[in-house]
Image: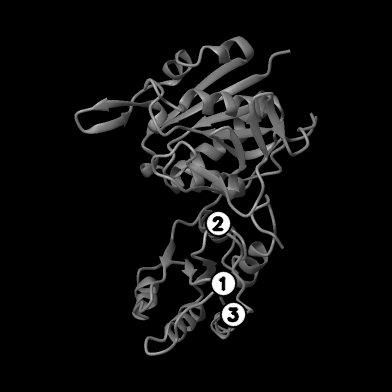
Amino acid sequence: MQKSILLITTGGTIASRETPDGLVPEMDAADLLAFAPALARHYQIHTLELMNLDSSNIQAEEWLIIARTVAAELPKYDGIVITHGTDTMAYTASALSFLLHDVKKPVVLTGSQMPIDAMLTDARNNLYTAFAAVEYGIAGISVAFDRHIIRGCRAVKVRTMGFEAFESINAPYLAEVFADGLHSYVPAAVPTDGPCVQLRDGLCNEVFLLKLIPGTNPRVFDMICAMGYRGVVIETFGAGGMHFLRRNLLENLARLTGRGVAVVACSQCLYEASNLSIYEVGTRLLECGVIAANDMTTEAAVTKLMWALGQTQDPEEIKRIFFTNYCGEITL
């Protein structure tokens, strides 16, 4: 029996056409499917045009719209494919991973580096891979790109032009496509009569991402506080370093956490985990009340903090949330 799949479109390069101002998302779901006719022969496809945006314009408000739509529609289908621009796809995939819990069916985001009507486009293969992920029952939030299926909260865009634009950071692929078909490394979803997804919405957009450089002015933390931010993710040096000689960041950071601002530290390094217990500079961060992100991606750390602050204002509860693995986002 053919799988019944909902295709949700949100815009992005995959749906773009050339205009005098550059690429602009203009195609609808029917346009996309016309360039991938094999899909209609293999699946029962339903469509929902949710928005038509460059992904640079997709923000927390759009994440909530997408999450609420998925929660409402997923029970009706075997899975959902979401087309999305690549630039912020990793943020959206991570956000959905926290907004949607116990996702027992496939919800697959995909897009492309070239519009689907371009002769050399990667869009068709990415669409085929996304639909195959639904067919094989790869449950949860994932990203399909360049013949790989990546856990949504582990996907990071690492190239601006290459077709191998996304990598799975600190976690194996969920599946890969080879000449003999899709090889899945996770168990297929098991049909259930119970709820297939739980929506736990609520996001706080007042989260700031700060990437340290040698000589960062400590007053930046005072400015962050004055602007009303409730959370900060700091990309620290290496395993968790931050300078405290001459320009002592720690004093101002402690004042920030003392005022109730949640601070999470991750590494500027793409691979492997931060560990604040290795060096003196890291242990001083812990003394300031900083939460360690361990091996989470920056995108996952940012969206998890936004989600945590959308659930509670209790600092201890925020720490508990960060030390909980909800969807494979962290290795504990």
Q: Mark 1: which secondary structure?
A: loop
Q: Is residue 235 left or right of residue 199?
A: left
Q: What colouring method underlies this structural image?
A: one colour
Mark positioned earlier in the residue sequence (2 or 3): 3
Between 140 and 181, which is closer to the camera in this rendering?
181
Q: CA distance from mark 3 to mark 1?
A: 13 Å
Kindly give the residue lying farthest to the left in the view shown.
20
Circle 1 residue = 239
Q: Is residue 257 left or right of residue 152?
A: left
Q: Is residue 185 left or right of residue 228?
A: right
Kindly give the residue lying farthest to the bottom in the view shown.
246
Q: Residues within 10 Å of mark 3 (few under 14, many from 20)?
A: some
Q: CA distance from mark 2 to mark 3?
A: 19 Å
Q: Mark 3: which secondary structure?
A: helix
Kindly give the residue lying farthest to the front in the view shown.
179
Nearer the observer: mark 2 or 1; the answer is 1
How far from the left and from the top, in percent, is residue 298? 51, 58
Query: Which label is found at residue 297?
Result: 2
Circle 3 residue = 286
Q: Residues within 10 Å of mark 1 (few under 14, many from 20)?
A: many
How far from the left and from the top, in percent, is residue 40? 57, 12
Kindly give the residue lying farthest to the top in the view shown.
41
Q: Mark 2: which secondary structure?
A: loop
Residue 327 seen in the figure: yes
Residue 99 seen in the figure: no
Residue at image position (59%, 49%) is 153
Residue 123 to residue 85: above or below: above
Amino acid bearing label 3: Leu
